Image (cartoon, helix red, strand yellow):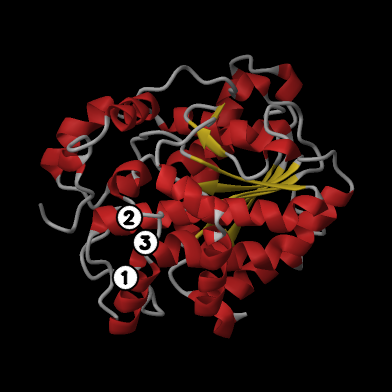
Amino acid sequence: MPNTIVDFSRLFSSLSYDRVVDIKDQWFPPKPTFTEANLERQDGRVFIITGGNSGIGLALTKFLYPTGAKIYLACRSEERAKAAMKEIVDEYQAAMTSGGDAQKSDPGELIYMHLDLNDLRTIKSSAAFFTQRETRLDILWNNAGVAGVPTGTKTAQNIEGHIGVNCVGPLLFTQELIPRLRAAAKVSPPAATRVIWSSSMIIERFAPDGGVDFSELDRMNAAGTGSENASVDYAMSKAGNWFLAVEGARRWGSDGILSVTQNPGMINTTVWKHQPNWLMAAMVPTFHSANMGACTMMFAGFSGEVGLDKNGVYILPFGRVQEKNVRGDIVIAIESGKPKEFWEWCERLYELYV
């Protein structure tokens, strides 16, 4: 199997019964427990959705726009972001014309902000665009990411592509926004201020022992080879997102900030654009719509089931708090301090750009 794709053909091979059942449960989950019907008005609140111009991010933005929130779409392409914003507004106006929800008749505000997670040199200025305009940030959805990139893919700083875009860049972006998150938390109910990270069930099949192999990442980064095994490298980045959520909970919990990770589900989005056509023809019928993934995102962002007593939890599709993960080795790694180690490893990679 070429390294340019996530190797779905090995997803269920040589797995214990518990792991097979767990993967099946995440691939074909129960109906959402939190939908747009559960959303309350969000007037005065400020959100950032990275990758808000497509896929799950776009679906989430469509659900949130009618609630009155100010929503920043953090994306690389201004053209695609503005096209998405027009689509959101047009659909909202069409819904109102045909007799939409009167409770949500006063929409929010959509703002484009540039964000390129592939280049650490640009991230601080992207965050500054926001902090110069806003005094608070209520929820940050770290939604943007890449999966199954071609062999050799690396960031502008020669970091392996998945880890760089999915972990290192988002952590730097989040750290730059923490003062605004703390400001929101001071005037909000406990756990109303949240940072949402994005994981995947792929970690349970392809992540190495302990979730992240630092020596392998260091080797690839030093050699400048970029991604060498898409399945493993992507899985490490998603385990890394889990680690960042846990460590964020430890660091920010006393400020009233909730930090969790979520697997939105197996969703049919452009994140799979590097996969071959024959594979996607077989897989797409088993995938779910972006709206379903957005339901997981809304649960993570708003559900009262997720309070500070559950800070750092892993949320399953389409809105369930995971009670036990079948990857005991990763759980042990979390309990033994690996999230802190990974956090500091990411910091060393971006420290020149702060």
Dot 3 surroundings within 10 Å: few (below 14), some, or many (20 or more)? many
Q: Between marks 3 and 1, how big is the CA–CA gap? A: 13 Å
Answer above or below: position of 315 versus 195.
above
Residue for badge 3:
162
Dot 2 surroundings within 10 Å: few (below 14), some, or many (20 or more)? some
Q: Secondary structure at mark 2?
A: loop
Answer above or below: position of 187 versus 102.
below
User: In the figure, residue 158 lies in which quadrant?
Assistant: bottom left
Residue for badge 2:
208
Q: Between marks 3 and 2, how big is the CA–CA gap? A: 15 Å
At 27% across and 49% down in the image, what residue appears? 273
Q: Between marks 1 and 2, how big is the CA–CA gap? A: 10 Å
The mark that comes first in sequence, 3 or 1, is: 3
At 74% across and 65% down in the image, what residue appears? 131
The mark that comes first in sequence, 1 or 2, is: 2
Residue type pointed to by label 2: Pro
At 76% across and 40% down in the image, what residue appears? 191
The mark that comes first in sequence, 3 or 2, is: 3
At 40% across and 36% down in the image, what residue appears? 326
Answer above or below: position of 88 versus 257.
above
Q: Nearer the viewer, mark 3 or mark 2?
A: 2
Residue for badge 1:
216
Residue type pointed to by label 3: His
Residue type pointed to by label 1: Glu
Q: Are marks 1 and 2 in contact (CB under 8 Å)?
A: yes
Q: Secondary structure at mark 1?
A: helix
The C terminus is located in which quarter? bottom right
